Image (spheres, helix red, strand yellow):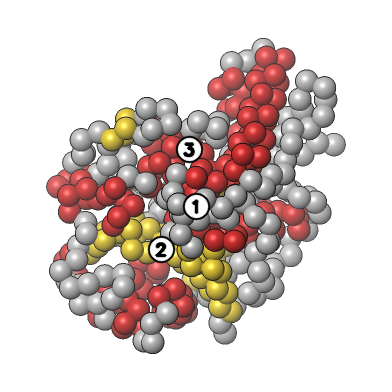
Amino acid sequence: MSHPHQGPAGPDGAPCAEGQRSVAEMMADFAARDRCLRTAARRAGLPRRAFLASLAAACSAGAVTASVTPRARGAAPPAAALAAPAATVARSRVVVVTHPEVLIKGYTVNPPIIRQMMDRAVLELTGKRTEAEAWTQVGREGDFVAIKYNTMHGPTLQSHTEINDAVVARLTGDARVDPKRILAVDRALPQRYDELSDPFTLPSRGLKTRLRRLYTDHATAIVNVSVLKTHFGDGISAALKNHLGSVNNPSAYHGWEPDRMPRSLPELNALEPIRTKTRLVVIDAVRPLFAGGPVDEPEYRWDYRGLIVSTDPVAATAVGLRILEQHRAEVRGEPWPMTPARAMVAWGQKIGLGAADTARIDLVQAAMG
């Protein structure tokens, strides 16, 4: 019996290609899957967008019947490369820190443990000798820091506010940032910061979008705090997608067709105000969502008990993607790739935003506790 998350069959009845290594192979594979979707939509007598919506609903309703076994602390993400190296992309460092005692019950976390994990991650990321030295790489006296976190889809799927608290405590204590010049927000902003910038045009499909003036005119530093979860089954919601809460038209981005989220989200993050001001990227991987999404589905959760930390949103998302894909393969007993998500990080590398290929990511795994 076919699984609701599997890609549709092509005209000859064979499944669409699932695996890829290079950017070119990824994009060709994604184009083949798109042709399959068009064929299936015609057979169903539906417009393509209506058919995609029905697929998303099926993903949301589907169930995984295999048992879920939590990964051992500190286990490495899969080593398979996600994209071909791009000459214009420098190496990036990503820290995955885990702690067995970070969860208290359900989705509730232990605040002191979160602070310890953040300190360890920033130390490993910066290579500094002390926490004070490390946190001055994130914020400095005189900065205005915007912490963009995620509150979407309920209290059991938003980024933990304890992460924000840990960042604020270190920035005000060690980096001497004025607490009045730190603002933690998602989509609801105070009016003066909620005004919209002049439009930016994203190159791939000419999408015009406006950023909140918090990011263009006020903030000198941005901390991106997102959640590790799947989106419509095979897409990913993490660091790159988090800035949909920073624009005026997030609905214009939605859809995992090749020319929509996989290209538009990296291009959004490559806009000068976001790209140059981002000092820290944190993906909350305490209890990731490995299938379905973007709404919470308890049967698709597992306790990874980790944080993914970097300065590169592409590299952080790529590492989170591999963590999800490894767990998905464990659940299904065979590869269960997230092809649109792979295409997204590949495009992020191709446009020079960050590193997606494992050969360009220095991965540090810190198992605490």
The answer to whether residue 366 shows anywhere in this view is yes
Locate the C terminus and report the quarter of the image it occupies.
bottom right
Image-quadrant location for residue 138? bottom left
Describe the element under mark 2 as helix, strand or loop: loop
Image position, residue 196 (x, y; %): 21, 39
Which residue is rendered at x = 46% and y = 54% of the image?
89
Residue 337, given in percent of the width and then of the height, sits at 69, 47
User: Element under label 1?
Assistant: loop
Which residue is farthest top?
A: 45
Give the residue at the far front of this rendering.
87
Which secondary structure lies at badge 3?
Answer: helix
> Which residue has dot 3 on it?
263
Say above or below: 118 vs 248: below
Mark nearer the N terminus (1 vs 3): 1
1 vs 2, front mark: 1
Q: Judge left or right: residue 297 versus residue 162.
A: right
Tell me: 91 left or right of 246.
right
Mark 1 in CB contact with mark 3 (< 8 angstroms)? no
Mark 2 is on which residue type? Thr
Give the label on residue 311, or none: 2
Residue that badge 1 annotates: 87
Q: Residues within 10 Å of mark 1 (few under 14, many from 20)?
A: few
The amino acid marked with disc number 1 is: Ala
- Residue name at image x 67 percent, y 14 percent: 42
**In the rendered image of this protein, does residue 48 appear above or below residue 212?**
above
